[in-house]
Image (tube, helix red, strand yellow):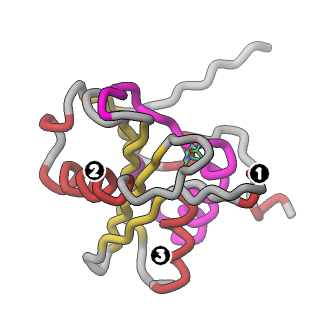
Amino acid sequence: MVKTLQIGYEEYSTWEELDKEDFQLIQEAKRIRETAYAKYSDFRVGAALLLDNGKIIVGNNQENAAYPSGLCAERTAIFYAIANYPDAQIVKMAVVAGKDENTDNPVAPCGACRQVLLEYETRQKKPFEFLFTGMKGRVIKFHQTAQLLPFCFDGSQL
Ligand code: THU
């Protein structure tokens, strides 16, 4: 039997179409992207998280001469948030990425980051939103990170 999976998400054609909160979070992600340490790929990524205590936590990608030792912006930001605010809930996360100012293709999170996002969504027992975009233009918005990783492996299987 062949089964079909449906994944729901929103798409906006410009940042200006977003509501104020989403737009602000994207601006924060864009700002922190500037200081990414992306010496090897020159591909800079910024991530910003809104917590339910009102705090915005930001992070960017950190590369290393030993390539696998680097870390994506999403995980840099989320690990800091969970370490410092273990009791707070994540409301949403926004990611801005691209090589240059003209990148207008939304940059989706890598598989390892999806797994990490899902871990904390499961932990807080409440979905959080995930938005990603290039340096301008289209924005993709998911209402829960579980939708980014169908057929996932989680702790319930251990
Ligand atoms: N990168 C991120 O920070 N997030 C992603 O979701 C995709 C990739 C970083 C890792 C590396 O520093 C650079 O982008 C090129 O892969």
Mark found first going from the N terminus, 3 or 1: 3
* Residue behind label 2 places its C-beta within 8 angstroms of ligand 1: no
Please indicate, yes or no, whether residue 118 appears anywhere in the rendered image: no
Disc ID at residue 81: 3
Cα distance in 3D space between marks 2 and 3: 17 Å
Residue at mark 1? 153
Q: Amino acid at mark 2?
A: Ile
Q: Secondary structure at mark 2?
A: helix
Which residue is painted at 52% across and 42% down in the image? 42
Does residue 112 appear anywhere in the picture? yes
In which quadrant of the rendered image does the C terminus lie?
bottom right
Q: Quadrant of residue 29?
A: bottom left
Q: Is residue 7 above or below residue 126?
A: above
Which quarter of the image is occupied by the N terminus?
A: top right
Q: Is residue 110 magenta?
A: yes
Looking at the picture, tell me which residue is in the foreground, 124 or 33.
Answer: 33
Q: Which residues are magenta?
A: 101-130
Residue lying furthest right: 158
Disc 3 marks a residue whose amino acid type is Ala
Residue found at the far top of this picture: 2
Q: Is residue 40 magenta?
A: no
In terms of secondary structure, where does tag 3 sit? helix
Q: What is the C-alpha distance between the residues marked 2 and 1? A: 29 Å
Disc 1 element: loop
Q: x, y percentage for residue 104? A: 33, 26
Front of the two marks 2 and 1: 2
Q: Which residue is mark 2?
A: 26
Measured along the vertical axis of the image, is residue 4 above or below residue 80?
above
Q: Residues within 10 Å of mark 3 (few under 14, many from 20)?
A: many
